[in-house]
Image (spheres, rainbow, N blue to C red):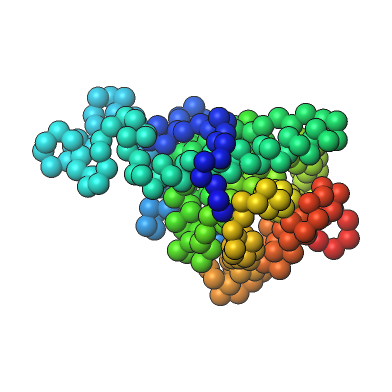
Amino acid sequence: MEWKGRRQSNNIEDQRGAGPSMGGNNPFGRGNGGFRIPMGGRRAGGGMSIGTIIFLVVIYFILKAMGIDLLQVMGDGGGQASRPGIEQTDNASQRSSPQEEETKAFMATVLAETEDTWNGIFQAAGERYEEPKMVLFSGSVQSACGFASAASGPFYCPGDRKVYLDMSFFDELANKFDAAGDFAQAYVVAHEVGHHVQNLTGVLPRFNQQRQRMSEVEANQMSIRVELQADCYAGIWGKYTEQKGILERGDLEEALNAATQIGDDTLQKRMQGYVVPESFNHGTSDQRRRWFKRGFDTGRVDACDTFKGEP
């Protein structure tokens, strides 16, 4: 994807290194209205559960409020924790490597391209597109949908209309899910922005209201349709990007491969060796690939009605 030198969005909030906000303690989840890329049972911290990590983070900040800095206690006696390769500073950009700063610039460029696409589509329909914010965080973050760790994966929160992303996810996308490439990363962002479009058009509010009366199986089936529509919307963005002439050879295949690798059936086979179809809530690999391609081929919002017929 030929992205360098293009406009970057100003709707970026860089909270990397800021630490978790302790303004709330609700665990993040679909029940809080968040819509995320599935992680297939990822556990953060090399085996520790998310609950354990959150508990340790809470303890750390309680002790720090009491004047006890665990990093200094556990350091080598020099008054500062020893963390090779990471400068101890309160500035996120100073802690970032050149590669991380380039990824941030890429994310800002992709977000800008989604803004151009959806501003144009909404304007053509006589409506105004409200651009979402993208929050870059490291480790954990507090959103209107609750507290989330990096293990949650990228997600969109309807409550504050923001996309949340820990950029370390892209390393896992490439190394764990075999979905490398810049357009695979762009697909992830465009999918979450697709949820924002659904929020503006009333799809997410209706779903969140209806699923309160649904069984778990029924809610999962409806969730699949919501997720596939976001994939289709991501495909529409891909179409507009292609028309600008900034896609490179192999970009489309990168996005289709990413959609395949994070399908519910593929994730379950990888993580547990078998599939449980009634537990699917994002769609199979075939469905996700097919709906992204449909959006890409047509470039039309009306082609993305996943709520009619079989998904």
Residue drawn at x 67%, y 48% as measured from the top left: 244
Expressed as whole percent of the image width and height from the top left, the position of residue 99 reads 39, 48
Give the left or right position of residue 110, taking residue 290 as reference: left
Q: Quadrant of residue 159?
A: top right
- Vertically, is 174 above or below 135? below
Along the horizontal axis of the image, is 227 left or right of 90?
right
Question: Residue 123: horizontal and vertical position, in percent?
Answer: 80, 32
Image quarter of the C terminus? bottom right
Is 282 above or below relative to 90? below
| Residue 121 quadrant | top right
Above or below for 62 versus 288: above
**Which percent across, then down, holds residue 104?**
47, 41
Q: Is residue 286 visible?
A: yes
Q: Residue furthest top?
A: 66
**Which residue is located at x 73 percent, y 35 percent?**
119
Q: Position of residue 40 (x, y in %)?
A: 55, 61
Q: Nearer the viewer, residue 299 or 171?
A: 299
Is residue 164 shown left or right of residue 103?
A: right
Q: Is residue 46 above or below residue 17?
A: below
Residue sitting farthest toward the bottom:
273
Residue 55 shows up from this direction: no
Count of marks placed on residues: 0
Camera-side residue: 25 or 238?
Answer: 238
Please report the residue visible at 51 percent of the width from the left and 31 percent of the height from the top. Answer: 13
Horizontal side of 206 relative to 258 (left or right) equals right
The outermost residue toward the left is 77
Question: What residue is drawn where x is 46% and y is 39%?
Answer: 137
